[in-house]
Image: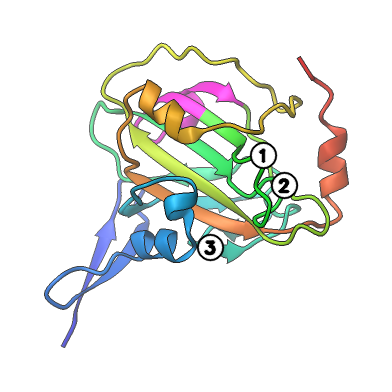
Amino acid sequence: MALLLRVTVACGAVLALVTVRGQAANPTTEAFGRNEIVPDLIDVAPEQTIKITYPQSDVEVSLGNQLTPTQVKARPKLCWEVEPSALYTLLMADPDAPSRSNPEMRSWKHWLVGNIPGADVDAGDVLADYVGSGPPQGTGLHRYVFLVYKQPSRIVFNETVLSSRNPNRGKWNPAEFVKEYELGVPVAGNFYQAQYDDYVPELYATFTDTA
């Protein structure tokens, strides 16, 4: 008979349910591999799952579930298991820009925050403001991936800070970013998939800052 273990994190949410039959099955690692986020975006999948909710639309990210650009247009709430006094970096990227079959703009930077104390994203240093999903019409499903890295210490980031109005976010290489700042492997992650809906033109219309 399998033994079921629940993993509870600091925010009080159950993020993982693993089955033990000699060794633990990890739903996060399995989903990242099955959806080819490893190796398209990262080489090593995270073991923890970030709890991600979009309060305005009352939806939750669940390891590849399909959401709409309308549902994810506002910044979400995130929670993951943290270590006392640790700082973290959060990134969100789309490796399927402009499409999964032709990812010549891989990856598109959707969100980047560093020096996050615990899981308090609002208290971190914003390097790129959150921008929701804007997959071009006719390009099918895109994968939108959230990753959290534990920092070795406080970091002085040498990055151009991007506002939510700035669309110059393509051809970003998260692996090079992680290597430059010695972030190691991600400690937590999650992702959803989305394709074009009627909100996408509204999102594009907000891109006014091209500097």
Q: Secondary structure at mark 2?
A: loop
Q: Is 135 situated left or right of 50 in this image?
A: right
Front disc: 1 or 3: 1
As measured in the structure, the alpha-carbon distance from the residue carrying label 2 to the one carrying label 1 is 6 Å
Mark 3 and mark 2 lie on one chain; the one further toward the N terminus is 3
Q: Is residue 100 above or below residue 113?
A: below
Callout 3 crowding tier (Cα within 10 Å): few <14, some 14–19, many ≥20: some
Front disc: 3 or 2: 2
Q: Is residue 13 above or below residue 133?
A: below
Q: Please tell me which residue is depicted at 29% across the width and 64% down the height of the picture.
A: 26
Q: Quadrant of the C terminus?
A: top right
Q: Give the quadrant of residue 179.
A: top left
Q: Position of residue 105 (x, y in %)?
A: 67, 39
Q: Which amino acid type corresponds to the residue marked 2 in the rendered image?
A: Pro
Q: Please give the residue where the numbered disc 2 appears in the rendered image.
A: 98
Residue 58 in view in this figure: no
Q: Secondary structure at mark 1?
A: loop
Mark 2 and mark 1 lie on one chain; the one further toward the N terminus is 2
Q: Per the image, is 139 magenta?
A: no
Q: Which residues are magenta?
A: 113-128
> From this viewpoint, which residue is outermost toward the bottom?
1
Q: Please tell me which residue is depicted at 60% across the width and 34% down the height of the picture.
A: 109
Q: Please give the residue where the numbered disc 3 appears in the rendered image.
A: 64
Q: Which amino acid type corresponds to the residue marked 1 in the rendered image?
A: Met
Q: Is 52 situated left or right of 168 in this image?
A: left
